Image (spheres, rainbow, N blue to C red):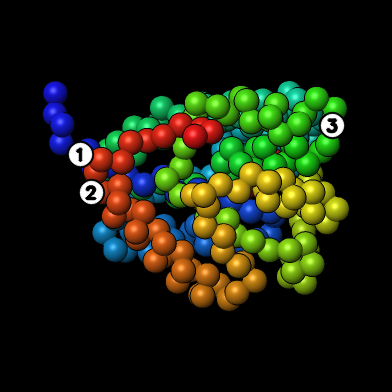
Amino acid sequence: ASTQPQPRGAFIVFEGADRAGKSTQCQMLVEHLQAAGVAAELWRFPDRTTAIGKMINSYLTSQADIDDAAVHLLFSANRWEKREELLRKLRAGTTLVVDRYAYSGVAFTAAKGAPGLDRAWCMSPDEGLPAPDAVFFLSLTVEQAAARGGYGEERYEKADFQRKVLEQFQAMRGSSWRVIDASQSIEDIQQQLREQAAAVVARCQRGGEPIKQLWG
Ligand code: NYM
Ligand code: MG
């Protein structure tokens, strides 16, 4: 058995309400890392390509109605079904830039304010999943999102609900979160993300960084 530090890829999660620019920034960051010679992949949750993901997609596009608790468990199951592949990639040295993770899971369900679905209940199914090395929270108010042309057509994309989602994110903010003011220009945001990501990637590449578990 080796006691050498094991180099690995970094697990970087992007969070925020809808329209904060996560997908744009994730894409740009992955391309930047790859151009710099870092093995990196862009992932997103929900992953709508799996059987579970297809059910989630039907729900989000209002083709299906699913009980609040049941759909919450589907979102979580969609992460669990990707767990082994996620760990395999990290251990093989690939950095994963992930557009939403369990924090969105908790924030969006808890924001419903449904009886029995408080934050503690919402957190429990994701307990034990791999924890990210860094969470970049793209912070944008509902008013700023509206000024950008507003929301799309999917379930949850309404100002009143997004305000509640933001309150839930606020309550979950941990010490490993980097809050980025998402009202800045795309280029300014990307610059800050690149600097922060480089430090996380370097730390994981050096080795000796165990992969932690939620909700640690
Ligand atoms: N969402 C996302 C949840 O409600 N629970 C979850 O666990 C996750 C990962 O899905 N409005 C919600 C947040 C979004 C919606 O995500 C679809 P996206 O990134 O817009 O495709
Ligand atoms: Mg969306």
Task: Say if 135 sits above or below 198 in the image.
Answer: above
Q: Residue at x 41, y 34 (%)?
A: 212
Residue 58 sits in which quadrant? top right
For label 1, count other residues whose C-alpha is less than 10 Å away and answer few (under 14), some (14-19) or many (20+).
Answer: few
Q: Residue at x 61, y 67 (%)?
A: 182
Label 1 near label 2: C-beta < 8 Å? yes
Task: Say if 7 sits above or below 55 in the image.
Answer: below
Residue 31 at x, y = what percent?
Answer: 40, 61
Residue named by callout 1: 5
Considering the numbered disc 2 on the image, is that residue within a helix, a strand or a loop? helix
Residue named by callout 3: 114
Q: Residue at x 85, y 53 (%)?
A: 160
Residue 83 at x, y = what percent?
Answer: 45, 29
Residue named by callout 2: 206
Considering the numbered disc 1 on the image, is that residue within a helix, a strand or a loop? loop
Q: Residue at x 51, y 75 (%)?
A: 188
**Kind of residue indicated by mark 2:** Arg
Residue 30 at x, y = what percent?
Answer: 41, 57
Task: Classify residue 198 as left or right of residue 135.
Answer: left
Task: Classify residue 198 as left or right of residue 14.
Answer: left
Q: Nearer the viewer, residue 140 or 93?
A: 140
**Kind of residue indicated by mark 3:** Ala
Name the quadrant where ligand 1 sits.
Answer: top right
Furthest residue in direction front, as rendered: 175
First along the sequence among labels 1 and 3: 1
Task: Say if 156 sits above or below 214 in the image.
Answer: below
First along the sequence among labels 2 and 3: 3
Q: CA distance from mark 1 to mark 3?
A: 45 Å
